[in-house]
Amino acid sequence: METKVLDKATSDKISFISYIIPEFASAYKMNIQDAYRYLKKYGGYDYLSKHWGALHTDNVIWAVHDIYKICYKNGGLR
């Protein structure tokens, strides 16, 4: 069986997404699974996946807030 190694950008992206979803959950008093579902449903996950490079350079509070604004704009309430 061949083992594949992730390139640095992919590894960094996975690390950031794995970090920011629990931060989002904590900020909005959700459990991690509900936060993930919320982000998927209202476009936050797609935004996060596409713009993680810019978001990871920002303060976590602002990154979480930016993701929330995308979800809110797409019909998410919380």
Image: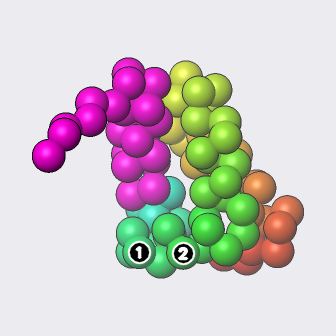
Residue 62 is drawn in which quadrant?
Answer: top right
Could you tell whether 23 is left or right of 38 in the image?
left
Residue type (three-letter) at the residue carrying disc 2: Arg
Q: Nearer the viewer, residue 23 or 50?
A: 50
**Span highlighted in magenta in the image:** 1-22
- Residue matched to label 1: 33
Q: Is residue 24 visible?
A: yes
Q: Residue at x 61, y 46 (%)?
A: 48
In the rendered image, residue 66, in percent from the top left (x then y), is placed at: 70, 46
The answer to whether residue 31 is left or right of residue 63 is left
Q: Is residue 57 above or below residue 26?
A: above
Q: Are marks 1 and 2 in contact (CB under 8 Å)?
A: yes
Q: Quadrant of residue 30?
A: bottom left
- Residue lying furthest front: 1
For the point 44% across and 32% down, the residue is: 10
User: Which residue corresponds to mark 2?
Assistant: 37
Q: Which residue does the image show at 60% across and 73% down from the upper left?
A: 38
Q: Position of residue 37 (x, y in %)?
A: 54, 75
